[in-house]
Amino acid sequence: MPLPPGLTESDFSDLLAEFRQAVGSGYVYSSDEHLQGYRDGVSPLYQTDQEPVPSAAVAPANVEEVQQVIQIANRYRVPFWVNSTGKNFGYGGPAGVVNGTVNLDLKRMNRILEVNEANAYALVEPGVSFFEMYRYLRERNIKLWLDVPSPGWGSIIGNTIEYGLGYTDQGQRVNFLCGMEVVLPNGEVMRTGQGAIPGGVSWQHYRRSIGPRIDELFCQTNYGVVTKMGIWLRPEPPAYLACSIMTDRNEKIIPLIDTMRPLRLGGIINNNATLYRFPFVQEGEENPDNPGGWNNRVAFYGLEGVVKQHWEHVQDAYNDAMPGTTFASNLYTTPYDLDSLGRSPDRLMAGIPSLGSSLHKTYFSMALPFDGQAAWDLILLLDEASKRHGRRYFGMAHHVETPHEMVTTSSALLRPGDDEYNQTTMRMIRDWIVSTGEKGLGPYRVSTPYMDDAMAQFSFNNHRLLRFYEELKDVIDPNGIMAPGKNGIWPRHMRENRA
Amino acid sequence: MNRTLILRTGLPFALLLLANGAAAQDELIERGRTVYADWCAICHAPGEGATRILEERYQGALPAVVDQRTDLAEELIVARVRTWVAPQMPPFRQSEVSDADLEAVIAYLKRNDE
Ligand SMILES: Cc1cc2nc3c(=O)[nH]c(=O)nc-3n(C[C@H](O)[C@H](O)[C@H](O)COP(=O)(O)OP(=O)(O)OC[C@H]3O[C@@H](n4cnc5c(N)ncnc54)[C@H](O)[C@@H]3O)c2cc1C
């Protein structure tokens, strides 16, 4: 495995000795075998000479140990990358951007510190996965539901601060984040919002202090290690109605989205209503010119009579705008027997975690106006860009996260070990990023190999936004050790690394 | 790869069995059952993703559910759990499945071996 940048063998062994002193010798890993799980085996760069390979990993058990590890990293000027549960597959997995990074593995910090059923919130550590939280709630018969992304093994903190999304009415989960504890890159601990008051009783209730709310400074950035986070949950609804709105033909995405817009803005549809290409096709499986169609997954939560009435109204709206639309729905009421949902797609909108197994993809996700034509134009644009690389665009999912916007997640397949194929995939994704940028569209989340390309699109006034991010970086992290290159934000001494 | 890192004792599995005695072995298997439930069943339970892939591969020649197998070599389990053998099964870190957990899950998966 590589050495951290700038360190000699003997510095490195001193560094490891100090880490061992801080966290115990069983929790510092530097052998090839122990570091395999910190590499991204589904990255297009895996086992190429461009792969960022970790030099070591350290797994602290508590916030004091995190502080010590960061203080040591500062003394040695060693870059570190954070893993809460390290399952960020599709977006870089557990690996960092810089070769020789030390992974700061927070999985051992997996306590659910508080669940307040009356006020519907939880306070968690970074190692807590969606599966663990779900089991905790069910085992104690706590009648709260949790919003989950499709793979349930990720971290509530890791996924939420990456702006991860779920499928319930709390699908844009970052909006339900309430209060953080952060270890800053100089090793100091800070609490945000009401947590800044010693013994602050409103930490998980009220999201601000006085002055600006800064929690999102720690989202998708490299300004601090989040060690605790409050998350609002939702009380179990008396009824849950899981619905599908289905159309033939791909281009019907235009009326499908435009019909939904007033319903979503008007609060009739409230969940992260996701449109999936249906039947789902992907590269190599089927003709991309297949007329296809869409399955729009919508959920209603509330009183049985009310959810049924909302669903009637929604069906009327689609029948008027788009005759021939087909509908399906399943009603669930209390007392729920959620396990009986089996592997039904209805699980996801009820916040029941599960796990698929198609990890060998690389993702690129865009923000879009809530507009049917914009979604269709994007599909055509990405298909044109893909053709330049001998590929086709197969579309993926459009998530109506809020009443005002959508995000589109696109993925491209990788072939493990086929370097030429994977290099083409990477060139194609860079082309997607640039050609959408030229149309004024920006990414919402990208994988590590394309972070510089993605940030480069936000170039208004000579990249003033990026320069601002980097001015902050230099102040908050003067030695530039935390996650260099994360989302294109580089510390001063490494800016020449920018792709 | 350093094999002694995997089994703390460094002893081959069969020897371990003899040395430990039946009660300790049962305990190890029970612990392995829990590790399997926490970390493996999300993909390997009946109907889940890995089971469907293995069903297709073995077409009934071998059980598709990994914990119903009686032919899994220890080396194969270790390689699967610690390295990227296949892109759909990322290796587990020590902070997730420790060497002791791995030893237990091996005992569990081999509990019905001839
Ligand atoms: C098939 C498939 C489906 C997917 N579906 C979804 C989906 O529905 N919704 C979705 O949102 N994502 C989805 N993803 C993407 C990804 O798998 C998840 O977002 C996953 O939860 C991220 O991994 P994690 O939670 O373990 O986070 P981690 O890997 O632990 O963290 C993610 C990143 O956040 C930063 N970070 C983590 N913890 C901290 C911390 N404590 N302090 C500071 N920074 C930190 C690090 O930069 C890290 O790289 C999918 C991926 C695949 C392959």
Image: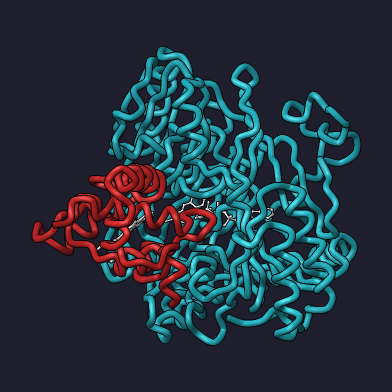
Chain colours: A cyan, B red
- The x, y position of residue A479, in whole percent, is 85, 70
Q: Observer-nearest residue: A253 or A397?
A: A397
Residue beneath the point at 38% across and 81% down: A417
Question: Is A212 located above or below residue B86 in the figure?
Answer: above
- Residue A211 position by quadrant: top right
Position of residue A303 relative to residue A285, above or below, is: above
Residue at 58% in and 29% down = A233
In this rendering, position of residue A96 left or right of residue B38:
right
Residue A115 vs residue A400: left or right?
Answer: right
Question: Would residue A438 be seen by someone viewing this image from the given angle?
Answer: no
| Residue at screen point 23% across, 51% down | B111
Seen from the viewer's position, the closer of residues A202 and A246 is: A202
Foreground: B6 or B80?
B6
The C terminus of chain A appears in which quarter of the rendering?
bottom right
Q: Is residue A268 left or right of residue A179?
A: left
Q: How many labels sit on residues?
A: 0
State the image coordinates of residue B31 (x, y, percent, origin top left).
38, 44
Indicate left or right for B110 with B5 as reference. left
User: Could you tell me which quadrant the N terminus of chain A lies in?
Assistant: bottom right
Q: Nearer the viewer, residue A333 or A357?
A: A357
Q: Is residue B100 above or below residue A123?
A: below
Where residue A300 appears, x then y in whole percent? 45, 26
Image coords of residue A327 (percent x, y): 30, 33
Give residue A447's quadrant in the image.
Answer: bottom right
Q: Which residue is drawn at the image coordinates 41% and 70% (left, top)?
A: B83
